[in-house]
Image (spheres, rainbow, N blue to C red):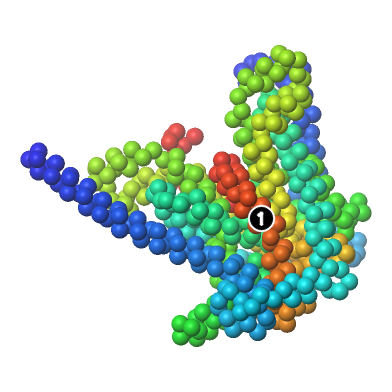
Amino acid sequence: MRQSRTGQRYKKSDYVAFLYIAPWIIGFLVFQAWPLAASFFYSFTDLSMLKSWNFVGLENFREIFTHDRIFVQSLKVTVLYVVVSVPLKLAFALLIAMLLNMKVRGIGAFKVLYYLPSILGGSVGISILWRFLFNRNGLINLMLGKLGISAVDWLGSPQNALFTISMLSVWQFGSSMVLFLAALKQIPRDLYEAAEVDGAGRVKMFFRITVPMITPIILFNIIMQMINAFQEFAAPFLITKGGPLKSTYLYGMMLYDNSFTYLKMGYSSALSWIMFAIIMALTALIFRSSEYWAFYQDGGN
Amino acid sequence: MHMGAENRERKRKKNGQKKGCMGRLMCYVFLIALAVVMVYPLLWMIGSSFKENNEIITSMSILPKQIRLSAFVEGWKGNGRYTYLTYFTNTFLLVVPTVFFTVFSSMLVAYGFARFRFPLKKLCFALVISTLLLPEQTLMVPRYLLFNRLGWLDSYKPMIVPAIFATYPFFIYMMIQFIRGLPRELDESARIDGCGSFGIFARIIVPLSKPAIFSVTLFQFVWRWNDFFNPLIYINSVSKYPVSLALRMSLDVADTVHWDQLMAMSLLTMLPPVLLYIFAQKYFIEGIATSGLKG
């Protein structure tokens, strides 16, 4: 029988736990662990729905890194999308959370309104709305026209399209904001009062008190938003179809096309593992770097 | 010297108050302006679904010149063979079981983690958390091939069955956090009264976890309702389309022709999540804040 750390043996009644977590064990093995392992294996094959498969070693990766121009383009716009949308969204979320934390009246109503887009954001209806708002003769250009500004080709020009798609993500800053707000509420007021007595300015207080105190939530938000942004699919698929000139052809769309349009499943598995590796590397990097900009109350444990 | 310091202090405080008042006003103006900017597109969408096609592309106003319902009537007819009644029914058939099983399985698993000591618990918990970081798209191809072999394609099973097996780590985590916050004394007294572990679960834990159950139900309902990616992969027959796929079909067909119908149907498909949100916003916002998870 195994021993727990406290030296107590597990009782028979403890093993009942496995009955309760059984659904998760099965689900984890069948729908998560096995598919992960399988896609790793597939990435070394030329698996396709159309013919029998062969083991091809590193051929897929060689092809991707040396010949696949679309991969390079897609990775480029995806990184751009992540770099634009995630910091903008989080900066916005933090700014609004700080304003709402100033004990303003009607904070509940503001919270409810700001959170609304996060509820709807993933829906097809919103993508349709976005497509219409930023159409050549959509609402935004109509408004600009009234102000005497000439129409902007928000979705039709390769320079603007990615930015327009990013705005849809920024618009959904609500859930990050709620998390920031909850974290801000935990900061003891007397820290700010003490800093004020010492004559610290707002900016200094922000960087010396606010940011260090909410570091875990900042980290969490950055990582989750980054993972989501890397996988963004519906918005470009529905609003721009990846165009114009593949300027919004995000990684998620490329994976979908390779898997289900061209049915190159071995190849797309290799692509998906490259994305997974990038996400893991970035997550590790963010954690590592946080040692330099973050202070934990309990000394970093 | 002492007086001087006190005076300076008082002066600074007064200044601060004046600044605070102006700051507060600015803050309100900003917050309200932002709320208007954020919600205007939605209100405009509501208005547009009552407008004529031509009015949609020429008018910035939210209010239509006249209320006409033809966009709803015509849009509802869908592609002629299936109406939106079919799509809405399908969505419920897909979403309701998925939500039910998610809640049930997450609850059971969370109970196991929150109230028992068992071998490899730390490892299992770490695995639950690490699956949060696992991109769905890396699992997509093997899952598709598995469901293909099982003959589940073009049915709702690829979405419902994983829910039975607690594959939503976010909800498990949320539930674990909640159950950990419940006092253990209640468990003990129930045990003394002769309850087994399942009795404790059914009679103590589940009733006390109602707020968490509400939160999970609401989030999962809204996310599954909005989900576009999974149905796109797994559902082929138009007769089985949920609203997300139906809208996309209408978008391809109606593009630039029937914007009014498209707006009307988009609005209708967004209504169930919005209504839920309006009536239960507390559970959404508190659910997200207390779990400390998900963006």
Q: Is residue B128 above or below residue A256?
A: above
- Percent coordinates x, y for residue A135 in the rendering: 61, 79
Q: Secondary structure at mark 1?
A: helix
- Percent coordinates x, y for residue B22 in the rendering: 30, 58
Q: Residue at x 50, y 67 (%)?
A: B37
Along the line of sight, the residue nearer the viewer: A265 or A128: A128
User: For residue A268, which quarter of the picture?
Assistant: bottom right
Q: Is residue B201 above or below residue A296?
A: above
Q: Residue at x 84, y 63 (%)?
A: B86
In the displayed structure image, the side of residue A197 where residue B85 appears, left or right: right
* Residue type, label 1: Leu
Q: Residue at x 75, y 53 (%)?
A: B139
In the displayed structure image, the side of residue B41 where residue B67 appears, left or right: right
Q: Residue at x 78, y 52 (%)?
A: B95
User: For residue B48, which quarter of the picture?
Assistant: bottom right
Where's the N terminus of chain A, which quadrant?
top right
Residue pointed to by mark 1: B275
Q: Is residue B125 visible?
A: no
Label 1 environment density (alpha carbons within 10 Å; few <14, some 14–19, many ≥20) = few
Along the line of sight, the residue nearer the viewer: A293 or A25: A25
- Percent coordinates x, y for residue B138 in the rendering: 73, 54
Along the line of sight, the residue nearer the viewer: A83 or A186: A186
